[in-house]
Amino acid sequence: MLPLIDVVFLLLVVFIYTMLSMAVHKGMPISLPESTVLKPEKDIVLSVTINKDNLIFINKDPVDLEHLTHILKQKAKKEKKPEILLFADKTISYQYLFKVLDRIRQAGLNQISLQADPEDQN
């Protein structure tokens, strides 16, 4: 017979593993800026990623800046309440970030969330 603490520990491990496997990130791997107050958002509708080479991706699909507005309009039609999570590498220029933001807004999407990594408090 197993002690109760072993059973509780096993359930806790299964619960943690299950929760971590549910976390979905549709963006590309980039180096995000850090923030002490931002928390990662879990509900992703559309993910726009700008990597360090100024390449733009929508849910891991490469897109050029000129076609970004058109493609976002098409993808937003499928959602009832379209939201954008914007992942931008911390090394890109501020001006380029605003060019992308302008294209997102031109697509009629105003719920934009800039993503950041939690800042290390050490």
Image (tube, rainbow, N blue to C red):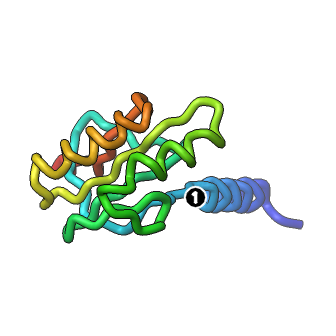
How many labels were placed on the picture? 1
Label 1 sits on residue: 20
Quadrant containing the N terminus in the rendered view: bottom right
Please say if 105 is above or below 88.
Answer: above
Q: In the rendered image, is residue 45 in sight?
A: no
Occupied quadrant, residue 53: bottom left
User: x, y percentage for residue 39?
Assistant: 37, 39
Q: Nearer the viewer, residue 26 or 35?
A: 26
Along the viewing direction, whichever of 107 and 13 lies nearer the viewer = 107
In front here: 11 or 102? 102
Q: Position of residue 74 (x, y in %)?
A: 56, 47
Q: Residues within 10 Å of mark 1 (few under 14, many from 20)?
A: few
Tag 1: residue type?
Answer: Leu
Q: Position of residue 15 (x, y in %)?
A: 68, 54
* Residue lying at 40% horizontally and 46% vertically, measured from the top left: 69
> What residue is drawn where x is 29% and y is 51%?
117
Relative to the observer, which residue lies in front, 81 or 34? 81
Q: Residue at x 27, y 47 (%)?
A: 100
Q: Is residue 78 left or right of residue 90?
A: right
Q: Is residue 11 visible?
A: yes
Question: Residue shown at 58%/58% (left/top)?
Answer: 20
Quadrant in the picture for residue 36: top left
Q: Is residue 80 left or right of residue 90?
A: right
Residue 113 falls in image quadrant: top left
Give left or right: position of 110 versus 34: right
Q: Secondary structure at mark 1?
A: helix
